[in-house]
Image: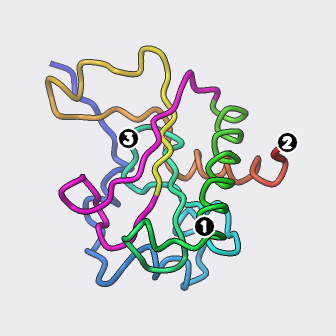
Amino acid sequence: MQQLYATWRMSYIEAPKHEGCIFCDFPAEHKDDEHFIVHRGETCFVIMNLYPYNPGHMMIIPFRHTNVYETLTEQEVLELHSLTAKAVKVLKKVMRPDGFNMGINLGQTAGAGVAGHLHRHIVPRWNGDNNFMPVLSETRVLSDAIANSWRKIKDAWDECKLS
């Protein structure tokens, strides 16, 4: 039997549980490098998912604490979509995925890990990235560390312009 070591994941396992809302608190701390914040807009920000489905998994999040989609302001809706388009463009340039999963889970029943603060997931996908590990061993294999993905994406963010 072979063993798979992903020792860098221990920091996630041992991390203390966060009290409060991480999507409010992380941007307020102004520790973008520590929290893997890629970009700050006027009403929304872009952050790497600390528990990614795939390398490059990002989220677009309004600064304002809400979980009611229909209460988003016009400016928040426009920036949420604009930042999503830019994130896709950056991921295409940096990671060259074959496709994307994107979505918003509204409420715990819908699968929201942080049910009190809405956020859009952007997950890059590659042909053949589904393998037997999640099915047989309940293990997800990630090919890149979050810090490395974040650095590549952050470096490319300002270079990419929407047309």
Which mark is on residue 163?
A: 2
Q: Callout 2: helix, strand or loop? A: loop
Mark closer to the observer (3, 1): 1
Mark closer to the observer (3, 2): 2
Residue 131 location (% of width, % of height): 30, 19
Which mark is on residue 45?
A: 1
Q: At label 3, which amino acid type do we have?
A: Tyr
Q: Callout 1: helix, strand or loop? A: strand
Which mark is on residue 53?
A: 3
Question: Residue visible at 63% across and 32% down?
Answer: 95
Residue situated in front as seen by the camera: 142 or 88: 88
Are the two marked residues, 3 and 1, in contact with CB atoms closer than 8 angstroms? no
Question: Residue visible at 85% across and 48% down?
Answer: 159
Residue 85 location (% of width, % of height): 67, 45
Which segment is the magenta one?
A: 96-119
* Among the two numbered marks 3 and 1 on one chain, the one whose residue lies closer to the N terminus: 1
* Among the two numbered marks 3 and 2 on one chain, the one whose residue lies closer to the N terminus: 3
Q: Looking at the image, which residue sits at the far top?
A: 128
Residue situated in front as seen by the camera: 69 or 42: 69
Q: Is residue 113 magenta?
A: yes
Q: Quadrant of the N terminus?
A: top left
Residue situated in front as seen by the camera: 147 or 8: 147
Q: Taking 3 as reference, is 107 above or below it?
A: below
Q: Count residues near mark 2 (Cα–Cα under 10 Å), then give few for <14, some for 14-19, many for 20+.
A: few
Q: At label 1, which amino acid type do we have?
A: Phe
